[in-house]
Image (spheres, grey):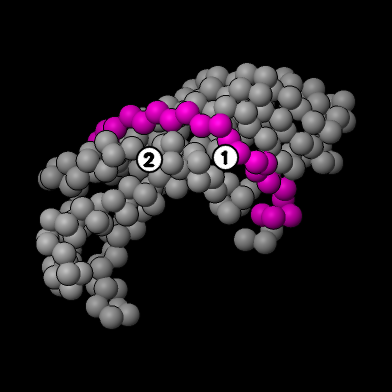
Amino acid sequence: MTQAALRCKSLEEALFDHELEMNLTTAMENKTVKDFSEADGYTEYAKGSGRTAEAARRSVTRKIAQTLTAHLAEGLIQVTVEEMMKEEEYRDAVKKKEETAIIAKFSRDLPPFRAYVDVTTKCGCMALTNIRYRFEAEPNVTVQDAKITLKDDQPESILFGTLVANLTLNLLLGSQSLKICSIKGTVEMPGTIDLSPADADRT
């Protein structure tokens, strides 16, 4: 499964929450979190952006939130599919050499997954500072009417019906974590998501 295949704008829009943006701003005030606005070169960036210092900070924070939301959507689809492949309906379809597996309802807590966002300040082409923010999502999903197409006993594509996602998002700080927020999104998943290994080989 490639990131391109897993990209779902409607799911990203459902998961994006201004509370996430606001709580990321609050997290930067925690003394244990590296604040990108204190990095080398950031002051010059803010001045050169033509915005006020506060507006420049909001712009970067929003970009972090948007990038993170895209990663969360991709990760959520991937772990959801992986867990659905353990369902009896899917295993029976593989055993019987059927072309499709229909899972009418799937609802459970999923394994946590991680994502990160890099914030880099530059002078021309030279990177001055890079700060990597690492996150862990604890997801719960409810899926209605999922259809997995099989080829040679392997998942080729999936067509979701409705997907309801609940995520608890934590910022990882070494051996500790800081809760950022909880996110809930409901979305009618449009179109088929390609899961074929051939696409994965092209990444």
Give amino acid for label 2.
Phe
For this orientation, the residue located farthest to the right is 97
Taking depth in this image into account, of 116 and 48 the one nearest to the observer is: 48
Classed neighbour count for the residue bearing mark 1: other residues with Cα under 10 Å, few (<14), some (14–19), many (≥20): some
In the image, the segment drawn in magenta is 175-200
SS assignment at label 2: loop
Residue at 12%, 62% in the rendered image: 52
Residue 177 in sight from this viewpoint: no
Instruction: Give the crowd class for mark 2: few <14, some 14-19, many >=20 residues within 10 Å.
Output: many
Q: Amino acid at mark 1?
A: Gln
Vertical placement of residue 165 versus 52, above or below:
above
**Residue 39, percent from left and from top:** 17, 63
**Quadrant of the image for the C terminus?**
bottom right
Residue visible at 67% across and 19% down? Answer: 104
Q: Do labels 2 and 1 touch, CB within 8 Å? A: no
Q: Residue at x 54, y 45 (%)?
A: 8
Q: Which residue is mark 1?
A: 78
Residue 26 at x, y percent in the picture: 17, 41
Q: Position of residue 44 (x, y in %)?
A: 15, 72
Q: Regarding mark 1 in the picture, which secondary structure is present there? A: helix
Looking at the image, residue 12 sits to the left or right of residue 89; the answer is: left
Residue 72 appears left or right of 57: right
Pointer 2: what residue?
16
| Residue 96 can be seen in this image | yes
The answer to whether residue 90 is above or below residue 4 is above
Q: Is residue 186 magenta?
A: yes
User: Camera-side residue: 197 or 11?
Assistant: 11
- Name the image quarter holding residue 139: top left
The one nearer the camera, 154 or 56, is 56
The answer to which of marks 2 and 1 sits earlier in the sequence is 2
- In the picture, measured across the screen, residue 43 lies left or right of residue 63, that is left
